[in-house]
Amino acid sequence: MQENTLSFDEYKTLTEQSPVLIWRAGTNAECDYFNQRWLDFTGRTVAQEQGNGWTEGVHADDYQQCLTIYLEAFHQRNPFEMEYRLLRHDGEYRWLFDRGAPFYHEDGSFAGYIGSCIDITEQVEGREALRKAQEKKIEDLSKLLPICSNCKKIRSDDGFWQDVELYLLEHSDTLCSHGICPECLAKHYPEQAKFLLKTE
């Protein structure tokens, strides 16, 4: 069975041409390598990104959480995953899914972290659109009033059934006046209805 080995140049080619953004940090938690895909994405040079320079492109709203997750994982030597927005070369912020893990020298000593990022902007926007749609649905449902089909009382939020007048008085500035529609007049007060019809 042939051993599956790659030369240094082959490894370098795979890393540089990988479809994902790849970074590496040393034992001091500062980044010392970014592959070409990363540099193409940001439009910046290795010198600009090295150390903590890459954080200049992180969205201000995501910066603190991004830094906290990274440093906590680094000090504990744990893998991590996080999402944050990074400024693309065209001036647009894109959502990245960043996964990092510690790596070690052959003697077992800690060497730093290696990470990879993929653009998940469409997925994040899809999740946000779904969340807004669900909130809208809940809002629409909250506007529905449960009304008894027989007596027409309204069920309040605490489960009690109230007369329409009382409910409107408690939940709005609406005041009710009383009258009687022609159908109810004919049904419940037939004599008066006949009299009214004669006088019209």
Image (tube, rainbow, N blue to C red):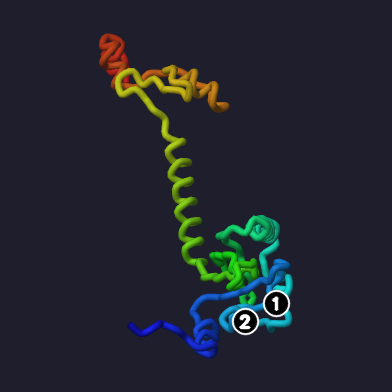
Packing grade of label 1 (10 A; few <14, some 14-19, many >=20) is: many
The foreground one among 15 and 77 is 77
Seen from this angle, which residue lies furthest top?
191
Q: Which residue is mark 1?
A: 49
What residue do we see at 65% from left, 78% from top?
33
Q: Is residue 52 left or right of residue 37?
A: right
Please give the residue where the numbered disc 2 appears in the rendered image: 39
User: Disc 2 on helix, strand or loop?
Assistant: helix
Q: Amino acid at mark 2?
A: Leu
Q: Residue visible at 47% across and 63% down?
A: 123
Residue 148 in view (yes/no): yes
Q: Find the distance from the CA under tag 2 to the CA under tag 1.
A: 8 Å
Rendered-image quadrant of the C terminus? top left
Task: Give how far across and how far down residue 186 sits, in percent.
Answer: 27, 16
Q: Indicate whether 162 appears above or below 122.
A: above
Q: Which quadrant of the structure image shows residue 70?
A: bottom right
